[in-house]
Amino acid sequence: MTELPGIVITGASGRMGQMLIKTVMASEKCKLVGVVEREGHDWVGRDIGEAMGGTAIGVHVSDDALEAFAKAQAVIDFTAPKATLAFAALAAQARCVHVIGTTGMTDDDLHELSHAAHHATIIRAGNMSLGVNLLTKLTKMVAAALDDDYDIEVIEAHHNRKVDAPSGTALMLGEAAAEGRGVSLNDVRDSGRDGITGARKKGDIGFTAIRGGDIIGEHDVLFAGEGERIILRHVASDRSLFAKGALKAALWGQGKRPGEYDMMDVLGL
Ligand SMILES: NC(=O)C1=CN([C@@H]2O[C@H](COP(=O)(O)OP(=O)(O)OC[C@H]3O[C@@H](n4cnc5c(N)ncnc54)[C@H](OP(=O)(O)O)[C@@H]3O)[C@@H](O)[C@H]2O)C=CC1
Ligand SMILES: O=C(O)C1=N[C@H](C(=O)O)C[C@H](O)C1
């Protein structure tokens, strides 16, 4: 019988960390072989099942990421940019697939990540759901079909604990709109209007970030023209959506050559 791929989850106590652990434990296609938290976290050393308020499952929280990665075929990582860069180097060393859901990475961070991808299979996306990846394709199509008489605005809403803005998803959608228009997002991006901003610049792609309560993740792409508006919308109502997508990516990545991939590759879109 072939061994099931072993998965490690980083940021074990986080909102996504816990959702990923539950998703991996419920899957018949892989097994949970490790969970990682940062040094000094009070979950380190505890059984993860008990730490999450359930029964023991025989997997203990470790603060030694390399040791955990060495036993795994894939690492699923939804943490923070600094942590993800450190994990990328360790995943490359351990030769395991690195699935990255972390958002808020700068251009310099992404450049550093591309070095790790010389030796490792990295699958990264600002949103791991099928729906958002489809919406990204649609956004590109609509932007390509319309000229800049249609103003493009990306509006996103998330819970009050989110630390980055615009969201990774909003940036994916903005990139897709810019690509559809044949421009670079960096040249037309307009985030954070405040005060006397002057009239809207034709061709800009605007971003608005709403933060409040327990909103899981909502994204609209608005194409506003004279006499009509087209709105493409995705609403996430359960975080398991992202975890299932990430697990699909981890399994898809098995045996793939080192390099950078995204969810479009995984989903064949
Ligand atoms: N791509 C996608 O589909 C999705 C992406 N995300 C992204 O995933 C990330 C995590 O989101 P969420 O779970 O809500 O956030 P949480 O704050 O709930 O969890 C983050 C986890 O990462 C750990 N962490 C943070 N910094 C470090 C570090 N330097 N070293 C080690 N561990 C660290 C935290 O540990 P500690 O508590 O000790 O700080 C915590 O366990 C965000 O970037 C979010 O945008 C979220 C949902 C979907
Ligand atoms: O932080 C979150 O919660 C989410 N982050 C991702 C993003 O930045 O787009 C994906 C999802 O919307 C939830």
Image (cartoon, grey):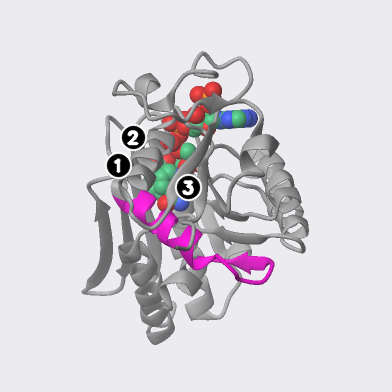
Q: Which mark is residue 159?
A: 2
In reply to whether residue 251 is colored magenta, the answer given is yes
Element under label 3? Answer: loop
Cα distance between the residues tagged 1 and 2: 6 Å
Please name which of the two marks, 1 or 3, marks the residue nearer to the observer.
1
Please name which of the two marks, 2 or 3, marks the residue nearer to the observer.
2
Give the residue displayed 41% in from the left and 72% down from the top: 267
The answer to whether the residue bearing label 1 lies less than 8 angstroms from the nearest atom of ligand 2 is yes
Q: Which residue is mark 3?
A: 166
In the depicted view, which residue is nearer to us: 120 or 189? 120
The answer to whether the residue bearing label 2 lies less than 8 angstroms from the nearest atom of ligand 2 is yes
Residue 265 percent coordinates (x, y): 50, 73
Amino acid type indicated by mark 2: His
Asked whether disc 1 touches disc 2, contact meaning CB atoms under 8 Å apart, the reply is yes
Give the vertical position of 167 relative to 11 (above or below). below
Quadrant housing the C terminus: bottom left
Element under label 2? Answer: loop
Cα distance between the residues tagged 2 and 3: 13 Å
Residue count near mark 3 (Cα–Cα under 10 Å), binned few <14, some 14–19, many ≥20: many
In the depicted view, which residue is nearer to us: 132 or 5? 5
Magenta-colored span: 241-262
Give the residue displayed 38% in from the left and 73% down from the top: 139
Residue 186 percent coordinates (x, y): 62, 62
Q: Which residue is mark 1?
A: 216
Amino acid type indicated by mark 1: Ile
The answer to whether the residue bearing label 3 lies less than 8 angstroms from the nearest atom of ligand 2 is yes
Q: Earlier in the sequence, mark 1 or mark 2?
A: 2
Residue count near mark 1 (Cα–Cα under 10 Å), binned few <14, some 14–19, many ≥20: some
Give the residue displayed 74% in from the left and 55% down from the top: 116
Q: Is residue 205 visible?
A: no
